[in-house]
Amino acid sequence: MGMVMIKCLETGSAIPTGIKMDRDRFRQSAVFFGRTFCPICQAGHEWFARDAWVEEPRQRAFRRSALQFA
């Protein structure tokens, strides 16, 4: 199970929406609209499911470690 993520429109950073979901279930879900408060830019972001993705915990850890060596 992973976290549904969106991109901060202000900074381009990936931010969690607070929604945990399986990647396959997310792909099969009906199109929906969401709102998420961004702790980076301190603003609310409105988004559609097509603009979001599911990031598994292992992917986030790998990306962080890969960025440290870049």
Image (spheres, rainbow, N blue to C red):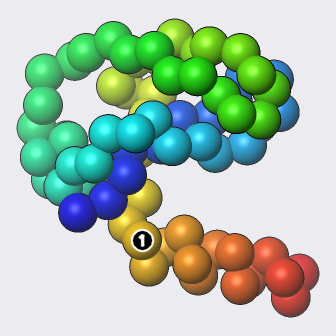
Is residue 41 rendered to the left or right of residue 61? right
Q: Tell which of 32 and 43 is nearer to you.
A: 43
User: Quarter of the image holding residue 49?
Assistant: top left
Q: Which residue is mark 1?
A: 57
What's the amino acid at mark 1?
A: Pro
Q: Residue at x 45, y 35 (%)?
A: 17
Which quadrant, please, contains the N terminus?
Answer: bottom left
- Mark 1 surroundings within 10 Å by alpha-carbon count, few (fewer than 14), some (14 through 19), many (20 or more): few
Q: Tell which of 36 and 65 is nearer to you.
A: 36
Residue 63 percent location from the top left of the image: 64, 74
**How many callouts does the rendering have?**
1
Q: Residue at x 62, y 35 (%)?
A: 7
Which quadrant, please, contains the C terminus?
Answer: bottom right
User: Quarter of the image holding residue 22?
Assistant: bottom left
Is residue 4 rendered to the left or right of residue 42? left
| Rendered view: 34 above or below 3 | above
Residue 61 percent location from the top left of the image: 57, 78
Q: Residue at x 86, y 88 (%)?
A: 69
User: Quarter of the image holding residue 13?
Assistant: top right
Residue 36 percent location from the top left of the image: 51, 22
Q: Residue at x 80, y 76 (%)?
A: 67
Secondary structure under the numbered disc 1 in the rendered image: helix
